[in-house]
Amino acid sequence: MAEIQQTSVTVLGLGAMGKALASAFLKTGRPTTVWNRTPGKDTDLVAAGAVGIAAVDEAVRAGEVIVVVLLDHASVHSALDPVAEQLSGKQVINLTSTAPEEARELARWAERHGIDYLDGGIMAVPPMIGQPGASILYSGSRKVFDDNRELLESAAAADYFGDDAGLASTWDFALLSNMYAMFAGFLHGAALVRSTGAAASAFAERATAWVTAMAQLMPEYGRIIDSGDYTTEVQHLAFHKAALDAIVRASRDAGVALDVVGPIKNLIDRQVADGHGALAFERTFEELR
Ligand code: FVH
């Protein structure tokens, strides 16, 4: 029986994430070529079967599909611009974190050079790659997504958002915003309880249970926002104003900076001052967009 030929892949960028992805691709048994600007980062991957190539143009020639995992938008141009000609006719999957407009700019750049471009946002840290729980969001060329589904799923669950290359990054950054706000809230809370001598690890235990329970309310938040109806019988913005005022007083008394909770209080104060005090907290969505 004839063997099924697996698409060869080249990974550009062997930082923590590039290494994790290349390692997952290698495990599928496909020919995997790796390149990094600074030499010496491919030792483990080469020992595991990858081909390490020092010249980026040769590395690009070696793979049918090119996975780019660099620091930022500028580093993608700095690595890819000189090899645009060699990339022509190939499929490029860029997993570097870029802002949506930067992803769209890269898609236009790729189109000008005859490159089929898929953008991705990685929702995982390197040790999660190849494990359940990791996911990568994609947008851009549907063909590149479909052609490489197996390759992509060897690294993480793969979801396609549409042909606008900026969509994956928009969802990625929206999720990261949610995450940063959550962790910033944790740090504020830890500082508050530390003023009484409590350990951050003790706070972490309670905060995990609390945030997990509160997260269950998010679908209802989404439903209310989508309905546009912010009327409520309970816990209106004036109620939250009283709570935030007290939290701010408690923080000041404890000597904890207001960088995290201060802006939330301002958002609520503004809405109450504008006459929305009887509406639900979810109305804050309107204030933000
Ligand atoms: N690591 C993580 O937890 C996050 C999870 C979510 C997604 N991010 C994004 O993935 C991109 C790569 O992240 P990384 O963790 O691999 O990052 P580093 O370990 O810092 O490696 C950076 C690589 O980029 C190369 N590089 C930087 N500038 C240039 C340039 N001008 N030309 C060519 N390559 C460049 C760097 O090469 P070198 O310094 O070793 O020569 C590394 O290979 C990133 O967008 C995250 O936001 C990861």
Image: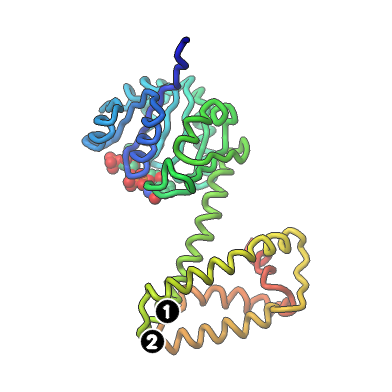
Q: Depth check: 254 or 55 in front?
A: 254
Measuring from the top left, give residue 271's x and y in whole percent. Answer: 67, 75
Q: Is residue 15 above or below residue 57?
A: below
Instruction: Count neighbours of disc 1 (C-alpha within 10 A) and say few if under 14, some if 14 to 19, many if 20 or more.
Output: some
Q: Quadrant of ligand 1?
A: top left
Q: Quadrant of residue 32?
A: top left
Quarter of the image with the C terminus in it: bottom right
Determine which residue is flagged by label 1.
Answer: 257
Is 163 placed left or right of 86 in the picture? Answer: right
Task: Say which residue appears at 32% left-offset and 38% top-offset.
Answer: 14
Determine which residue is flagged by label 2.
Answer: 196
* Element carrying mark 1: loop
Q: Quadrant of residue 75?
A: top left
> How far apart, in angstroms, are the residues tagged by discs 2 and 1?
16 Å
**Nearer mark to the viewer, of 2 and 1:** 2
* Element carrying mark 2: loop
The total number of labels drawn is: 2
Measuring from the top left, give residue 210's x and y in whole percent. Answer: 53, 72
Looking at marks 2 and 1 on the same chain, the residue that comes earlier in the sequence is marked by 2
Q: Amino acid at mark 1?
A: Ala
Instruction: Count neighbours of disc 2 (C-alpha within 10 A) and say few if under 14, some if 14 to 19, many if 20 or more.
Output: few
Measuring from the top left, give residue 266's x and y in whole percent. Answer: 58, 76
Q: Residue furthest front?
A: 1
Is 287 placed left or right of 174 in the picture? Answer: right
Task: Say which residue appears at 54% left-offset and 55% top-offset.
Answer: 175
Q: Amino acid at mark 2?
A: Thr
Is 111 placed left or right of 269 in the picture? Answer: left
